[in-house]
Amino acid sequence: MSTVTVINIEGQVQWEIGRDNRSGEIVAVCKPLGMVMHGKDVLDLQTGINDSLNLLFRNLLRAGELDAFLRAHGWKAGQLPVAHSPEWEDANFNVPIELIAAKGRDGQARTAH
């Protein structure tokens, strides 16, 4: 059985969420990362966000760009595995996320359109 390497990210990624009036799904936007996700409920949404962030960070790690990316966003990573070692191919990233209600121009929480 192989061991999964978990890399903790020190920082928080904020996602603005609202409900799509047409589909009823929850839509989340992360402006700092330029990402949009949707899910049928909050659990589905969080799973999609976590999967996407893991893919993003694995690709950055593989390209040797993760450290620079994290510094550019004011974040840090725990101990990173050695480049091209088996540990980083299947690494999981523990990224704190914050879901916040999207606000309209009037300052009230709004739904996505």
Image (cartoon, grey):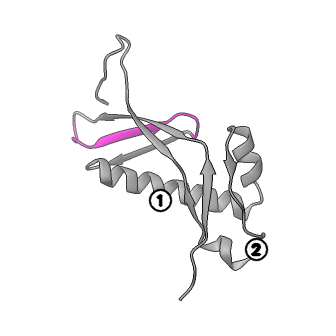
Position in image of residue 41 (x %, y %): 26, 48
Magenta span of residues: 22-33
**Closer to us: 18 or 74:** 74
Mark 1 or mark 2: name the one nearer the start of the chain: 1
**Closer to us: 105 or 14:** 14
Q: Quadrant of the C terminus?
A: top left
Question: Is 58 on the left or on the right of 16, as rendered?
Answer: right
Mark 2, other Cα within 10 Å: few <14 / some 14–19 / many ≥20: few
Residue highlighted by disc 1: 51
The residue that appears at 55% across and 41% down in the rendered structure is 12
In the rendering, which numbered label is found on residue 112? none
Position in image of residue 95 (x %, y %): 54, 51
Position in image of residue 25 (x %, y %): 26, 43
**Residue 23 counted in the magenta span:** yes
**Residue 10 counted in the magenta span:** no
The residue that appears at 31% across and 17% down in the rendered structure is 108
**Closer to us: 18 or 8:** 8
Position in image of residue 1 (x %, y %): 53, 89
Mark 1, other Cα within 10 Å: few <14 / some 14–19 / many ≥20: few
**Secondary-structure class at tag 1:** helix
Name the quadrant containing residue 88: bottom right
In the rendering, which numbered label is found on residue 84? 2
The residue that appears at 55% across and 39% down in the rendered structure is 34
Residue type marked 2? His
Question: Is 23 on the left or on the right of 102, as rendered?
Answer: left
**Closer to us: 75 or 50:** 75
Relative to 17, say whether 10 is above or below. below
**Secondary-structure class at tag 2:** loop
* Badge 1 vs badge 2, beta-carbon distance below 8 Å: no
Question: Is 65 on the left or on the right of 21, as rendered?
Answer: right
Residue type marked 1? Asp
Residue at the top extreme, as displayed:
106
